[in-house]
Structures are given as C-alpha cells and as structure tokens.
Amino acid sequence: MATADLLLHPVRLRVVQALLGDRAMTTGDLHAELPDVPVATLYRQVGVLADAGVLEVAAERRVRGSTERTYRLVTAAASVGPEEAAGMTPEEHRRAFGTFVAALLADFDRWADGGAAVPGGLDAARDGVGYRMTGLWLDDDEFTALVADLRRVLGDRLANEPGGERRRRLLGTVFLPG
C-alpha cells in the first residue's frame, strides 16, 4: 500500500496525529483519546499501521493472559514524500487535503468540547489556541527561505521531551498560492 493511501484513512490519520510528539501509547490509551472510534476499528487500523512500519512496538507487557503493546510513531514512515506527492492526481490531493482538514477539525472539536469541563469554560488565549490566515508577497527564493526558517525554528523545539510544565501542542501548516 502506498504511503498516501495508507495515511489517507481518517482513523489511521488520527492515530498518527495522536502519537505525534514522540508519544508512546497502548491501544487503550489511543481509545481514551479517540473515544468515538470503535475499539475493533482502532485495533484493526493500529495493526495496519504497525504492519506497514508506520508504528513500532516500544514495549510489551503481559496483562491478564494477553500481551499489551505500547506503540510509537516512526516519523519518517508517517509522511508522504515529495516524489509521491508529485505523482498524485488533483483528486488525490483534494482527498488528502480533505482528510487533513477533517482531522484538524476533530482535534479542534475535542478542545472545544473539553472546554465545558474546565472552570471558566473555553479560553483560547489561556490554552494557546489560535488560527488565522495571512497573505504574504514572496518570490520563490523568499518562500524557500521562509520554509527553511520555519524548519529551523520548529526543529529546535522538536527535540523537547515531555515533562515539567510542557503541554503537547499541535501545529498544522498549509501553504497555498494566492
């Protein structure tokens, strides 16, 4: 199965996104984070991702006569490469983008729905939630420099490990010509 086909399944994409940030989770942990996904579906899709090498087993332990596996994302295997993207049809790109947006909306809904349980309700500033679109006038060289700058800034932070006051934060990017 091609990487794009593998990742464009909505449940598999959500599993991949749940494991971003060097998280290690059992299928039970994943179900707690994705409670709307039936358990059987979750197990099946985790198995597909593991068989494809997108997930690796980080640990195993015996629980009541069965083996509980903890999975970790293999980041290099969890993205569509430039060569594959270049070979995608316009319809495949639409499907990929639609799946990305649907997963982004699901993450946003989880935040919005969780706000009801927090004293004071939703607070985008407190939670660091923001969304906006900006238009920039850039030639190709300036755009390439911008992307390189973003990779450097983000790369410095990708090595951060969980702990202390750190919270896992999701960052989605979309670049489109205007």
Image (cartoon, helix red, strand yellow):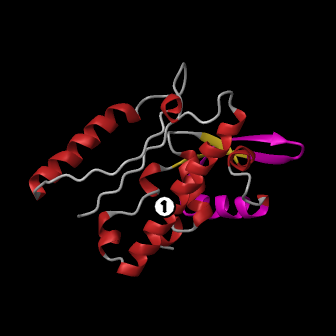
Which residue is located at x 37 percent, y 32 percent? 157
Which residue is located at x 55 percent, y 53 percent? 16
Horizontal and vertical percent for residue 55?
Answer: 57, 53
| SS for callout 1 | helix
Q: Which residue position is annotated with label 1?
A: 101
Q: Is residue 3 visible?
A: no
Which is more toward the observer, 23 or 55? 23
Span of residues in magenta: 40-68
Q: Which image quadrant is residue 4 in?
A: bottom left
Q: Which image quadrant is residue 118 in?
A: top right
Which residue is located at x 54 percent, y 62 percent? 102
Does residue 138 appear left or right of residue 162 in this picture? left
Horizontal and vertical percent for residue 77?
Answer: 45, 57
Query: In the rendered view, would you say 118 is above or below 66?
Result: above
Q: Which image quadrant: the C terminus?
A: bottom left
Horizontal and vertical percent for residue 66?
Answer: 84, 48
Report if residue 57 lies within the magenta region. yes
Report if residue 98 lies within the magenta region. no
Residue flagged by tag 1: what amino acid is it? Answer: Val
Which residue of the protein is positioned furthest toward the right in this rendering?
64
